[in-house]
Amino acid sequence: MTYDESTLKQLLADAEEIRGRYPVERSALLPMLHLVQSVDGYVSPDGIQFCAEQLGLTAAEVSAVATFYTQYKRRPNGEFQVGVCTNTLCAVMGGDEIWKRVSERCGVGHDETTADGKISLERLECNAACDFAPVMMVNWEFFDNMTPETALQLVDDILDGKPVKPSRGPDAVPTFKEVSRVLAGFEDGRADQGPAAGEPTLAGLQSAKDQGWKPAKGGAK
Amino acid sequence: MTELAPVLSAIWDQDKSWKRDTYVKSGGYSALKKALGMEPNDLVQMVKDSGLRGRGGAGFPTGMKWGFLPPDDGGPRYLVVNADESEPGTCKDIPLMMANPNVLIEGVAITSYAIGCNHAFIYLRGEVVHVYRRLLQAVREAYEAGDLGKNIHGSGFDLDVTVHAGAGAYICGEETALLDSLEGRRGQPRLKPPFPAVAGLYARPTVVNNVESVASVPAIVNNGVDWFTDMGTERSKGHGLFSLSGHVERPGQYEAPLGITLRELLEMAGGMRGGKKLKFWTPGGSSTPIFTDEHLDTPLDYESVGAAGSMLGTRALQIFDETTCVVRAVTRWTEFYKHESCGKCTPCREGTFWLTQILKRLEAGKGTDADIQQLLDTCDSIAGRSFCALGDGATSSIVSSVKLFREEYERHVTEGACPFDHAASALFDYSSEPTTEEAHA
Ligand SMILES: Cc1cc2nc3c(=O)[nH]c(=O)nc-3n(C[C@H](O)[C@H](O)[C@H](O)COP(=O)(O)O)c2cc1C
Ligand code: SF4
Ligand code: FES
């Protein structure tokens, strides 16, 4: 492994904390793979070796797991993972057109990275936000109700190095490495940023309030 | 007219609704204190009596599932919350945990106490970082307040909670694949039996429950069984989140008693977008056979939806109007199943591949009438012959759409192209070029 001393020290401390969360240490593998992505920007050969040593597995065993999951990247990833949902609901609501324009603007296709290393582009499966269709995700933060115009502005801003703000998420989207660290289970102090909900999330509650409905005894017949 | 019943969604519009303080001010964590003063078995009985059924899709009675755990043998037993929410159309657990993670944590604590679990896990899909942040914070705040940890509120009950992020794989929502994934392996389904109740996480007795199921427990403890059973229908009790998406004026989360109808929900949601006509919809996500406007008055409970030929599933109502090409919709769902098939069994791995090939041909207007029959035959060799329910689910929209819209498949063949203008279905204006050559993943 080629990690320098301070990186390795931090990795070891983090790995120890991750292992401590589980009664059986192999369970630490998924978060640990997120952790190595937070250092290397992908699941590197070093990262695989590190996980293997930490958990008493072979490198082949670690690789077999890493390749099963789409969030683990086998090549150095862009600073921003940009996804356009093209599952049925979003696709029909305009996601296909958004994908086409975004892909043209970035000059790359699915699972490819721009030459400047800024954006890795991806066609997403349903991201559990269909009531906000069409949906995009940047580093797994929600960008709701997109149009071709807002989508192109978003990728232009990223390519220009400007901070971008999700609809439901932190004040600005952190880098791929930073969110990978969160996915390894380490808080980043951003939980209180952003709203509780978007408008569709509150649609039913609002409607119930307008009507004066409450789920009181017998009230919800 | 059925009235909406905001229970889980009740505080989502409050300032910083995700904070523990907000939750406590509206009565949060009082059910935990009450539960800790009860006998665990009485809690299990209470949930049985409430009739609460699993909200993750299959609708299995929650209290009965808890009751299946073998007697205590002194070793560990686990609660694993399924927060993988990845079924196309399903979008209820994620906003729930974003807006109020604490109700889930309280449900986890009560459920764990009821089943004798001292270490619970929440398996969250990895593609929702902000939800993970809020869950991690809610768990930390709960430890700090003594709602989790050692000797909770002096009860002698200990509970640790680990929130675990997945890494992108729909199949990990299937409960046994989830357990393998949580054990640090490829997420592939296990042979059942043994069921998780007997040999689940680390081969120990385990309850796997959906987020919404577990989050429904605190209100039952607080308000009682009668309050819960007052809502819903004969065998589908209580409230549930109905997620409307697609061509409706106000898509979103509508929490209502089970048994509400789409007609009623549509009225609350402002009707179809632009007054257009409803064409087809999924009652419970992409794995459930599609419905049409003939099912507007079908009560959305387990029995009625089942009797009408589909499944209540996750109450993911994806609504498509007359501008939508059903062949396009079904093709896209099928590509999803092909992509997500874990590859463990041949009918699903090979079958979803062939289904995709045939459907893409048909959608592009290059198919033949024989292809339509070939589709149905291929579905026949997948449904009921696959290792897990993903394979069955992959065939649902195909078989139901051919039954309901066969002439539309045939038009693709006779006209040699898709007869629909895709731009007409979108939420924004654009002019669509002939779109047979869309980039596909
Ligand atoms: C392919 C597949 C995906 C699934 N995805 C989910 C999911 O994301 N969330 C969920 O709660 N249940 C999901 N399920 C259902 C689970 O296997 C299981 O029935 C459920 O978590 C049990 O919880 P409940 O009884 O509280 O509903 C899925 C099932 C299959 C076959
Ligand atoms: S049905 Fe599909 S997802 Fe399920 S085990 Fe077989 S290959 Fe895997
Ligand atoms: S289909 Fe795009 S978020 Fe569900």
Image: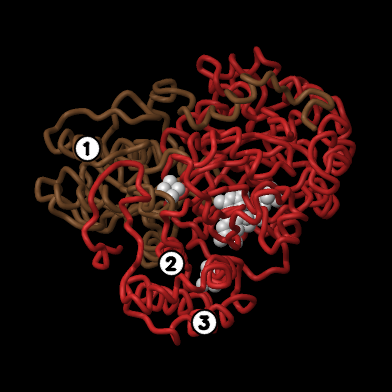
Please name the residue that numbered disc 1 is placed on: A149
**Residue visible at 36% across and 41% down in the picture:** A140
Image quadrant in which you'd find residue B198? bottom right
Disc 3: CA contacts within 10 A as few (<14), some (14-19) or many (>=20): some
Q: Amino acid at mark 1?
A: Glu
The Cα atoms of the two marked residues, 3 and 1, are separated by 41 Å
**Residue visible at 26% across and 63% down in the picture:** B435
For label 1, the SS is: helix
Q: Say which of marks 3 and 1 sits in front.
A: 1
Quadrant that contains the N terminus of chain B: top right
Please name the residue that numbered disc 3 is placed on: B378
Q: Give the red chain's letter.
A: B
Q: Do marks 3 and 1 share a chain?
A: no
Tags 3 and 1 touching, CB below 8 Å: no
For label 2, the SS is: helix
Q: Residue B402, image x and y in percent?
A: 53, 72
**Residue visible at 76% across and 47% down in the picture:** B53
Marker count (numbered): 3
The Cα atoms of the two marked residues, 1 and 2, are separated by 28 Å
Image quadrant of ligand 1?
bottom right
In the displayed orientation, state which residue is furthest to the top: B25
Q: Nearer the viewer, residue B373 or B316?
A: B373
Tell whether B441 sits left or right of B390: left
Q: Can see residue A128?
A: no
Disc number at residue B327? 2
